[in-house]
Image (cartoon, rainbow, N blue to C red):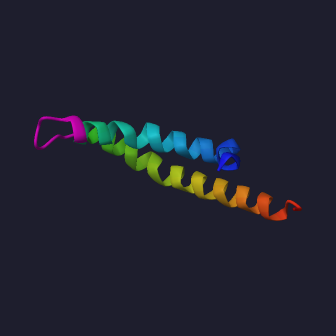
Amino acid sequence: MRDYFRSWLVRIGLGLLVIGTGPLLAVVLLSSNPNPNPIGFGMLAMLTFWPALACLFAGVVQVWWRRRKRPV
C-alpha cells in the first residue's frame, strides 16, 4: 500500500479528488438548506472528477506494473 502513495500520479489523483469534490460534498452534507444550490462547487467537481480518476487509475497500473517486474 505504501508503494501506491509514493506514486506521484496517485498523489495527484487523490489531491484532485479531495480538492474537486470535497467542497461540494461539504455543502451538501453540512447545509441546513434542504435545496442547496452549489453551482460553482458542482462545476469544480465535474471538471476534476474524471481527471482525478484517470490519474488514480494510471498511478495504480504504473505501481502494479513496477511491482510485477520487480524480482522476488
Q: Position of residue 1 (x, y in %)?
A: 64, 50
Q: Position of residue 66 (x, y in %)?
A: 79, 58
Instruction: Please tell me which residue is depicted at 67% across the width and 46% down the height of the picture.
Output: 2
Magenta extent: 29-37
Q: Is 72 on the left or on the right of 24, as rendered?
A: right
Label count reads 0
Q: Is residue 59 above or below residue 11?
A: below
Q: Is 47 on the left or on the right of 43, as rendered?
A: right
Q: Main secondary structure of the magenta part?
A: loop
Q: Is residue 65 above or below residue 39?
A: below
Q: Is 38 on the left or on the right of 19, as rendered?
A: left
Q: Quadrant of residue 71?
A: bottom right
Q: Is 17 on the left or on the right of 38, as rendered?
A: right
Instruction: Please tell me which residue is depicted at 38% across the width and 39% down the height of the picture.
Output: 22
Q: Position of residue 20 (x, y in %)?
A: 43, 41
Instruction: Please tell me which residue is depicted at 72% across the width and 55% down the height of the picture.
Output: 63
User: In the depicted view, which residue is nearer to us: 72 or 64?
Assistant: 72
Q: Position of residue 56 (x, y in %)?
A: 58, 53
Instruction: Please tell me which residue is depicted at 53% across the width and 44% down the height of the picture.
Output: 14
Q: Is residue 41 magenta?
A: no
Question: In which quadrant of the rendered image does the C terminus lie?
Answer: bottom right
Q: Is residue 65 above or below residue 40?
A: below
Q: Residue furthest right?
A: 71
Q: Residue furthest left?
A: 34
